[in-house]
Image (tube, coloured by chain):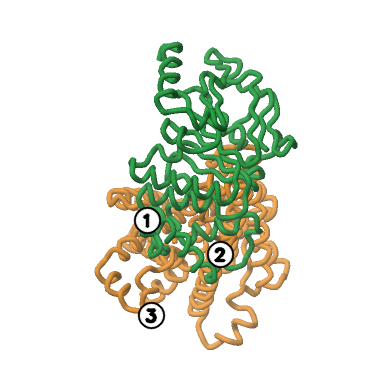
Amino acid sequence: MLEVRNITKIYHPGTVTEQRLFENFSLTVEQGQFVSIVGSNGSGKTSLLNIICGSIPIEGGEVLVGGKPITKMKDYRRYATMGRVYQNPAAGTCPNLTMLENLSLADNKGRPFGLGRGINRKRVDFYREQLRALDLGLEDKLDVKMGALSGGQRQAVALLMATMTPLEFLILDEHTAALDPKTAEIIMRLTNQVIREKHLTAMMVTHNLRHAVEYGDRMLMMNRGHIVLDRSGAEKAATSVDDILQQFNALSLDSGT
Amino acid sequence: MTDLLISTLTQGLIYALISFGVYITYSILDFPDLGVDGTFPLGAAVTAVLLTRGVDPWLTLVAAVAVGALAGLFTGVVHVCLRVRNLLAGIITMTALFSINLQIAGSNLTVDRGTDTIFTSAPVMALLGDMTLMGRKLVVSLVLAVVIKLLLDLYFKTKSGLLLRAVGDNADLVTTLAKDRGAVKILGLVISNALVALAGCIVCHEQRSFSATMGTGQLVYGLAAVIIGVSLMNFYAASPAARGLRKIRGLRVLASPAGTTAVILGSVLYKLCIQVALSAGLPANMMKLVTAMLFLLVLVLSGRKGEAIIHA
């Protein structure tokens, strides 16, 4: 279970540009739930993910995992049970390392990074098999530097790396936004598959309303630091893209954007 | 003429140790560590004091590595824990070390002719006793440079080494691997500064002296050697010769040499350039000016080709 309780987030506190994003904001995500989050720019979607991951500080409230507060826990410690894929395909891999080196790093997450061999040759067949399943022709490119691959290929590898070791939470920050429509579909299918197979609790921020409607068990719409729509189960299943689009446009008119 | 060539080669090989350190900070960690200008004479100061007290010459290497590591730790902690910008963290270390080095050595020191250095130590004499001092210096420097190169190559292939390369490439990824990026950066600075102090130590053995100002310009030297070496390597890796070699099994290694190999070559080449300038009648006082101008030239040339500094 993932929970944010009564959090306050203020950008640039004490200055003329002070902006109160969250005030007493709370959200609970159940174990194994796949939540998609939509909302206009500045609605607080990405800030919410950053707060959960510990990438930005908060001015009040608590972040809890399984009922235990992790508010004071450093970001890198939180990632022990979390995986994250970013919008920018370059952010999830090391461009100057080969794909094999990247995968080896991800494979060793949770274990010490000591003076043992960085690449475990025995795992190469496993990596190949995983890459073959992506169906992007990556299985023969283990020795290619990540930076030489396309955005879609990099994002697929980033997703693979983020979910390679046992984890509980997957944080997806507009991870299909920078991809062409066809690749975005492939990545979205893979994402859904891995979340279901590994029974992950997932939070996905997206600008693609259709993805938000089609995937996940619960959908949130955010506006100016508030949840304005929260649908799950049968209610979500009955929601169409047009419904959401109307809601979205109504909000946009309200806020004059 | 041969003597001059041998001594220049020796210098290039010894100073390659600085370049290894700079390679780790600048190329791998993307951290221009000005602390190098203080750590280099630190290694020399400790070595000069220990040698004059009659300590075994080989033990001074261990001592220099240890104090260099401490200096790197300091820069790292200042940068990571106190959140001081990387350039400033290095400048703080460099400035502090100037006084510390003088405190350690008392003043500029000379190691007298009667004292054994590594080049006249018993094990080296037993193996290379037939050679001239100059020849021994060249062989010992070559062995040191190659051994450290091989150790570094091995290290870069370990898990720890991979993580170090990853942190300079994409620090956010290291965070998502549940590792503290700050700790990895500090480790890199420790290794780098240990190597730079070791260079200072060997230089002290070679010239039998320590001077407080011997560190000035050493970062620039290291940077130039790294950039020359890496640029040439990239140029070579894209050449038809390398492409041909890549097709032949067993010779593939020759087609894409390790970054550390490039660094040694860069260091030797740079020393040669400076030696040529001096031999052409350039006054020694002008050397830093020439160093700076050569460095600028290298930067511009390597930049114009659009080649980023890419590590192994």
Can marks 1 and 3 be said to lie on one chain?
no
Amino acid at pointer 1? Leu
Colour representing chain B = orange
Whole-angstrom CA distance, mark 1 to mark 2, is 25 Å
Whole-angstrom CA distance, mark 1 to mark 3, is 30 Å
Q: How far across and how far down the image is residue B91, in percent?
A: 56, 42
Which chain comes out green in the rendered image? A
Residue bearing mark 2: A118
Residue bearing mark 3: B250
Residue B57 appears in view: yes
Q: How far across and how far down the image is residue A90, in percent?
A: 43, 46
Q: How far across and how far down the image is residue A148, in percent?
A: 36, 54
**Mark 1, mark 2: which one is toward the viewer?**
1
Amino acid at pointer 2? Gly
The crowd level at tag 3 (other Cα within 10 Å; few <14, some 14-19, many 20+) is few
Residue bearing mark 1: A136
Task: Check the image and report above or below for A36 versus B28.
Answer: above
